[in-house]
Image (tube, grey):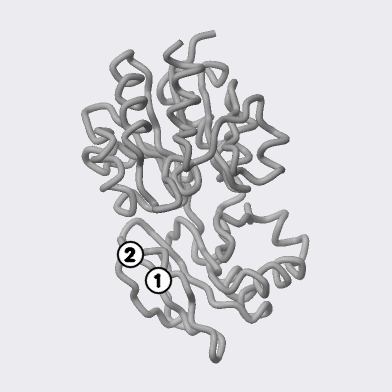
Amino acid sequence: MSIKLVAIDLDGTLLNSDHQVSEENKRAIQRAKEQGVKIVLVTGRPLKGMLSILEECHLTEEGDIGLTYNGGLVQWTRTGETLSQITLPKEDVLDVYKLSQDLNLPCNFIDLDTVYEPAYPKGKPSQYAKHMKALPFVKVDMTDLPEEFPINKIVMCWHREELDEKIKEIPDVYRERYTIMKSRDNLLEVLPKSVDKGKGLIQLSELLGIGLDEMMAIGDQENDLAMVQTAGTGVAMANATQIVKDAAQVITKSNDEHGVAYAIEQYVLN
């Protein structure tokens, strides 16, 4: 079965330790595109947060697609036009904010254009601004939210050691209600239950008419697990977490050894 679509995570996968895309990775992506293969960058970031990477890789041309917010939003990269999205309604935002208060963790809500800052626990400002440079931060009063307040994802960003301990305290009822996962050492994400990168690939399959068995997915972290399991060819980076390696059919080289290029050359171009 030939591969018609390659889904690629960013941090720890396409990007090296200096947060750059190597020339080797760029060349492999371009060669695959020239052969008619769809290259889709899949990330927890908003589209604005990866535009420079898309432009570097020539992935803002007609027909190029991005899968953002961990699979919850499908957009044309050239125009930003939304093809499909799944959001959290106001009642879920209030519900998850209460959880963050119970855990004594800072919390942010993100939509297409804005990062919202509710009141943080005393002495615990969110660390999310260190990661998110593409969107403005706007303070919000939780007692005065508009009735229509659709949010793409909610994050709790705090020191890894304390965050990991707090994660153990999350009641099962929240895990049943939402998709909850880490995307970085210090970043916990809460998404609609019907959202993960694997379900994003299913959405792409329906939109593009490409079978899941004709897809390759490359990732390294817990939030990549679902797409590595869903694609016909699941690829883990050499630097991936063990759970992702265990789920993958293939382990490529590390993100500092152009592992994306190696996987594309071995399984797409050959």
Q: Is residue 250 above or below residue 131?
A: above
Q: Quadrant of the N terminus?
A: top right
Secondary structure at numbered mark 2? loop
Q: Residue at x 46, y 32 (%)?
A: 260
In the rendered image, residue 234, in percent from the top left (x then y), is placed at 60, 28
Residue 30, numbered circle: none
Whether residue 176 sits left or right of residue 85 in the image: it is right
What is the residue that sits farthest to the top in this orientation? 1
Q: Residue at x 34, y 56 (%)?
A: 112
- Figure disc tally: 2
Q: Name the residue tied to disc 1.
A: 129
Q: Amino acid at mark 1?
A: Ala
What is the residue that sits farthest to the bottom in this orientation? 122
Q: Is residue 144 above or below residue 55?
A: below
Q: Is residue 103 above or below residue 12?
A: below
Q: Residue at x 45, y 23 (%)?
A: 264
Residue count near mark 2 (Cα–Cα under 10 Å), binned few <14, some 14–19, many ≥20 = few
Whether residue 100 sits left or right of residue 114 in the image: it is right
Residue count near mark 1 (Cα–Cα under 10 Å), binned few <14, some 14–19, many ≥20 = some
Q: Nearer the viewer, residue 24 or 156?
A: 24
Tag 2 near tag 1, CB within 8 Å: yes
Q: Nearer the viewer, residue 201 or 86?
A: 201
Q: Nearer the viewer, residue 105 or 150?
A: 105
Residue 133, numbered circle: 2
In the rendered image, residue 255, in percent from the top left (x then y), is placed at 49, 41
Secondary structure at numbered mark 1? helix
Q: Residue at x 29, y 36 (%)?
A: 76
Whether residue 224 sits left or right of residue 167 in the image: it is left
In the rendered image, residue 237, in percent from the top left (x then y), is placed at 57, 37
Q: Amino acid at mark 2?
A: Lys
